[in-house]
Amino acid sequence: MAQSLLKATRLIPPSVVLLTAGNKDHQDAMTATAMFVAEKLPLITISLSKKSLCHELIEKTGECALNVASVEQVDLAKKLGAPHGKDKFKAFGIKTEEATKISAPLIAGSYAALECMVLTSYSASNYIVYLVEVVAFKANEKLAPIAWLNDRYFSVDREAR
């Protein structure tokens, strides 16, 4: 029995990031996934729809923030994965913090916030894949990050042995 190849994309458990882009005047947020390119270089890939407001803002600013979602942010991750075209910060009461090296806001309560500058991008059908460099970060290791697998969220708070 043949399976849909779309299921293959849900078999790799990625981190859940709340991507933010823009500045104080015009900003957006969305749920995304990210993957590091190399451990010793602060390079990460992210992919998003060319139709998203975040894509438009990243194209204008050349930067974004990857807020690694914490267990406490599962509901926010679900909400940011669905709506388009409204002020999500106001609609969902998202508390922000100021970044140190970029103009995009950081989302308070995240496990980590990675401030990123775009190095290059690649068009892939209706998506754009960005290679970004981390230029600053902060983490709250008292919180537990989450991962996404088979359309479900999981806490990543203990080491497997």
Image: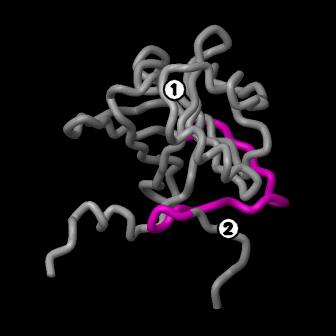
Residue marked by disc 1: 63
Check the image and name the residue furthest to the right: 142
Give the vertical position of 1 relative to 97 (above or below): below
Q: Nearer the viewer, residue 110 or 40?
A: 110
Q: Tell me which segment is drawn in magenta.
A: 134-152
Instruction: Identify which residue is drawn at 38% across, 64% down.
Output: 10
Instruction: Identify which residue is drawn at 59% across, 12% down.
Output: 26
Please, what is the three-letter code of the amino acid marked with disc 2?
Ser
Task: Classify residue 87 by image quadrant.
Answer: top right
- Give the colouring mode of the picture: one colour
Please, what is the three-letter code of the amino acid marked with disc 1?
Glu
Task: Assess whether residue 147 is covered by the magenta stretch.
Answer: yes
Residue 30 percent location from the top left of the image:
54, 36
Which disc number belongs to residue 131?
A: none
Residue marked by disc 2: 155
SS state under label 2: strand
Task: Classify residue 76 by image quadrant.
Answer: top right
Residue 17 percent location from the top left of the image:
57, 47
The quadrant the N terminus occupies is bottom left
In the picture, measured across the screen, residue 111 lies left or right of residue 149, that is: right
Q: Nearer the viewer, residue 38 or 63?
A: 63
Check the image and name the residue furthest to the left: 2
| Residue contact at pointers 1 and 2, CB within 8 angstroms | no
Q: Residues within 10 Å of mark 2 (few under 14, many from 20)?
A: some
The quadrant the C terminus occupies is bottom right
Residue 33 percent location from the top left of the image:
48, 50
Instruction: Identify which residue is drawn at 68% across, 80% down.
Output: 159
Q: What distance separates the C-alpha of mark 1 from that of mark 2?
A: 28 Å
Task: Assess whether residue 59 is covered by the magenta stretch.
Answer: no
Give the vertical position of 111 relative to 137 (above or below): below
In the picture, measured across the screen, residue 107 lies left or right of residue 130, that is: right
